[in-house]
């Protein structure tokens, strides 16, 4: 039996992860801005209020979790918000809001939980990123920037925590049939510039058509995520969904192609006393 600490647990991936973890006999600390919306109750569930942008609330939630269950074994950084719009269209306040939740909110929760995991010399950190954290596309630039940030510090965290017995895994889902594309979850840029009608405008139309028709099954995704906690050597990254796999493969092919094409210029900038790469 493990103790899971899940943020953003009232719906979507968070709720499915809580459900799957409980079904396997684990204890779960389920957090959300409005804990009354968390669809679980019982001895093995501790539902707590947590706005991840509030560092003091994160510390209080972790203290309550340890007081109730004695430990935390798996942290799932799931709370987040979406933002759709061309990079130029996104206001400063909208950009800061999505960074506050997706990036600084994750920092807040990790700073609260990691002392527990380090003291135990064991545990898992599972951060829900996005395939957009590996490859940017029109309309998702600012959102992708938050997920690129999560992936950057998570890679470093992976190396920092591994000697201490704590594993870090980045999960990169594609499009899953949750309410992520609903107006209640997805924020859109207020201003829409005509010059981006052929790129971002088409993405907006596609997202409206795809809402609740996404290819990914969140129940299967939750099962795959909970499986990660049982692996002796979990991956640093894992993609979920065939669309995510295809996009990552395309990005890797592009990076390799450009690296090979421009290698001569790249290595030419070294000092003369540096040997060949």
Image: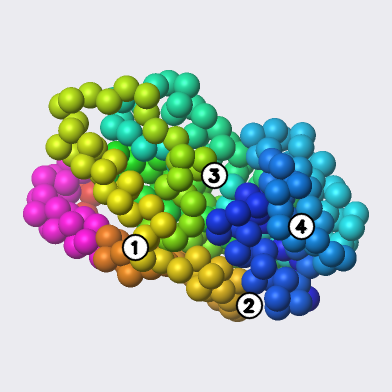
* Residue receiving disc 2: 230
Q: Nearer the viewer, residue 149 or 270?
A: 149
- Classify 10 Å Cα crowding around label 4: few (below 14), some (14-19), many (20 and above): many
Q: Position of residue 188 (x, y in %)?
A: 39, 33
Q: Quadrant of residue 261?
A: bottom left
Asked whether disc 1 touches disc 2, contact meaning CB atoms under 8 Å apart, the reply is no
Q: Earlier in the sequence, mark 2 or mark 4?
A: 4
Real-space Cα separation, disc 1 to disc 2, in angstroms: 23 Å
Q: Earlier in the sequence, mark 4 or mark 1?
A: 4
* Residue receiving disc 1: 244
Q: Position of residue 227 (x, y in %)?
A: 58, 76
Determine the secondary structure under disc 3: loop
Real-space Cα separation, disc 4 to disc 1, in angstroms: 29 Å
Q: Position of residue 195 (x, y in %)?
A: 15, 27
Q: Earlier in the sequence, mark 1 or mark 2?
A: 2
Magenta segment: 249-272
Dominant secondary-structure state across the stretch colored magenta: helix
Asked whether disc 2 touches disc 4, contact meaning CB atoms under 8 Å apart, the reply is no
Where, quadrant-wise, is the N terminus in this rendering? bottom right
Residue 161 shows up from this direction: no
Determine the secondary structure under disc 4: strand
Asked whether disc 3 touches disc 1, contact meaning CB atoms under 8 Å apart, the reply is no
Determine the secondary structure under disc 1: helix
* Residue receiving disc 3: 80
Determine the secondary structure under disc 2: loop
Q: Earlier in the sequence, mark 3 or mark 4?
A: 4
């Amino acid at each position: 039996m493990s103790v899971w600490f899940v943020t953003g647990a009232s719906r979507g991936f968070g709720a499915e992860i809580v459900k799957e973890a409980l079904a396997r006999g684990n204890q779960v600390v389920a957090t959300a801005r409005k804990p009354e919306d968390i669809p679980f109750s019982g001895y093995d569930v501790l539902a707590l209020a947590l706005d991840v942008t509030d560092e003091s609330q994160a510390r209080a939630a972790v203290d309550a979790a340890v007081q109730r269950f004695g430990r935390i074994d798996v942290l799932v950084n799931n709370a987040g918000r979406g933002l759709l719009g061309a990079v130029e269209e996104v206001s400063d306040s909208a950009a800061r809001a999505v960074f506050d939740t997706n990036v600084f909110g994750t920092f807040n929760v990790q700073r609260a939980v990691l002392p527990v995991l380090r003291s135990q010399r064991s545990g898992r950190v599972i951060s829900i990123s996005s395939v957009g954290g590996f490859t940017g596309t029109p309309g998702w630039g600012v959102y992708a920037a938050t997920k690129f940030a999560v992936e950057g510090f998570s890679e470093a965290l992976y190396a920092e925590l591994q000697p201490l017995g704590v594993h870090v895994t980045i999960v990169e889902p594609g499009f899953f049939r949750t309410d992520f594309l609903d107006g209640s979850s997805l924020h859109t840029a207020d201003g829409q510039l005509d010059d981006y009608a052929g790129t971002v405008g088409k993405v907006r139309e596609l997202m409206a058509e795809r809402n609740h028709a996404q290819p990914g099954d969140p129940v299967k995704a939750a099962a795959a995520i909970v499986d990660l906690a049982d692996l002796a050597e979990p991956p640093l990254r894992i993609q979920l969904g065939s669309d995510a796999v295809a996009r990552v493969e395309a990005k890797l092919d592009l990076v390799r192609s450009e690296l090979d094409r421009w290698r001569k210029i790249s290595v030419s900038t070294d000092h003369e006393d540096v040997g060949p790469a």
